[in-house]
Image (cartoon, rainbow, N blue to C red):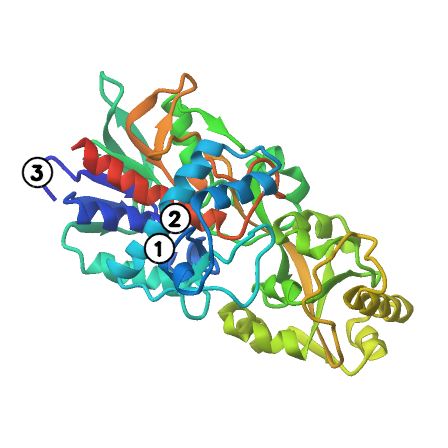
Amino acid sequence: MNSKGPDLVVAGAGGGLVAALRAAERGLDVLVVEASEHFKRGNNTAMSTAMIPGAGSRWQREQGVEDSPQLFVDDVMRKTRGTADQRLALALANVSAPLVEWLADHLKVQLDLVTDFSYPGHSQSRCHTVEGRHGSALLDHLVRCVTDEPRIDMLIPARLANVSVGASGAVNGVSVRLRDGSTESIRTPAVLLATNGYGANSELVSNYVPEIASARYHGSEYSAGDALTIGQRLGADFAFLDSYQGHAALSKKAATLVGWATVMHGGVILDLEGRRFGDETSGYSEYAALLAARPQSEGWIVFDRYIYDKCLVFDDFRQTVDSGAAVWADDAADLARVTGLPESAVVGELAALESYARGSAADPYGRTSFEHELMAPYVAVKIVPALFHTQGGLVVDQSARVLKPNGLPIGGLYASGGAAMGISGHGAAGYLAGNGLLSALGLSYLAADAAADSV
């Protein structure tokens, strides 16, 4: 680092590492501040399925997938019913393909396009991921790249306590709280808040997203709203604080992700009365609140051997299976027995599903996607609803600069991921697979370029 301090301080070693690496590539000296010693397994990037949307990427072209940033924005606006910030959605859509190609070319991340199933809301196959489809592999790779980069230092564990500004209103330093409780002041002209959202703050969750407050929180304990607190001190604007990513397929026994691929391949969800209660293909995020409202806020995700084999490509799914959370049944009556659900309800639901899948009857909940007709033997996993991360936060522009209510930027202050407002609109229903990770990585990439351009 130079004698005047780092050119950029990144608070958060998840998606923020992309900013550190991009800034270093652009010639900046960077300090990464991370609160958790166990961030490589405990932050939200590590806990993701590593799905990164890339609209118009070379992987899509190679496989004949016709996509564009505008098509991606159209999907975002459709899923959010027009409530998402369209200018930010376009900025992230525009950077999405360059981002995944930069990850592959500059950082040597091995990425593949997911084409074996489609997530709800995406009109094209545009999610790129790593082998095993787990964020821990992606984060491990980013950490190795950071370790090898001489322009980047890491301070762990240390928590960003405050950001200071000078007479001009621009950033001039940070205060960092160290392991022993002492505070260190560091001079810097630029700060990226990549500390995620407020999912670990039960008071804020109850205030802003009460419908999911009783669900299990499945994210970093340090996602406590630090960026909101710091931004409030600096007069920043906020938006979409009621937005979040829920998930309705978390194993109750193992607290691992069963995965929504089970549903998109043809699986269904039953409540504790043995009944379906909606169109499962509408989206895993909004379905979390629906599950939370069912008896005892629990249910069972039901699929079969075909779907089981399809989902083994996911590390999360394999971990769920290895935990013993999956139970098998020879027929519908046996499924009722092993799950403890009412036999008449289970038998009736599976018989009705057969008619929906074959097209001889219409699903009363409006589900039209039945990729596969369920056939015995059946597999079931008991599930609980979960809150993964919040999607609202500091208002940012197309360069990830944090804005005041008057629309002017706070000089040198940037935000990404859950620290910034996302592109999922309000509530949970607007979330598209990859929205969280694209906001984390894409805004970090844009922030690094903006910081480098300002030097």
Category of crowding for the residue at label 1, using alpha-carbon neighbours closer than 10 angstroms: few (below 14), some (14–19), many (at least 20): many
| Quadrant of the rendering where the C terminus is positioned | top left
Most foreground residue, 62 or 21: 62
Q: Position of residue 377 (x, y in %)?
A: 74, 81
- Marks 1 and 3: CB-CB under 8 Å? no
In contact (CB < 8 Å): disc 2 and disc 1? yes
Q: Is residue 249 left or right of residue 360?
A: left
In percent of width and height, residue 218 lies at 54, 54
Disc number lying in front (2 or 3): 2
Counting the numbered discs, the total is 3
Q: Quadrant of the N terminus?
A: top left
Q: CA distance from mark 2 to mark 3?
A: 35 Å
Badge number at residue 100: 1
Res 3 label: 3
User: Relative to 145, does residue 185 appear above or below in the rendering?
Assistant: above
Q: Amino acid at mark 3?
A: Ser
For marks 2 and 3 on the same chain, the one whose residue lies earlier in the sequence: 3
Reading the image, the residue beneath label 2 is 96
What residue is rendered at 78% in x and 83% in y? Answer: 330
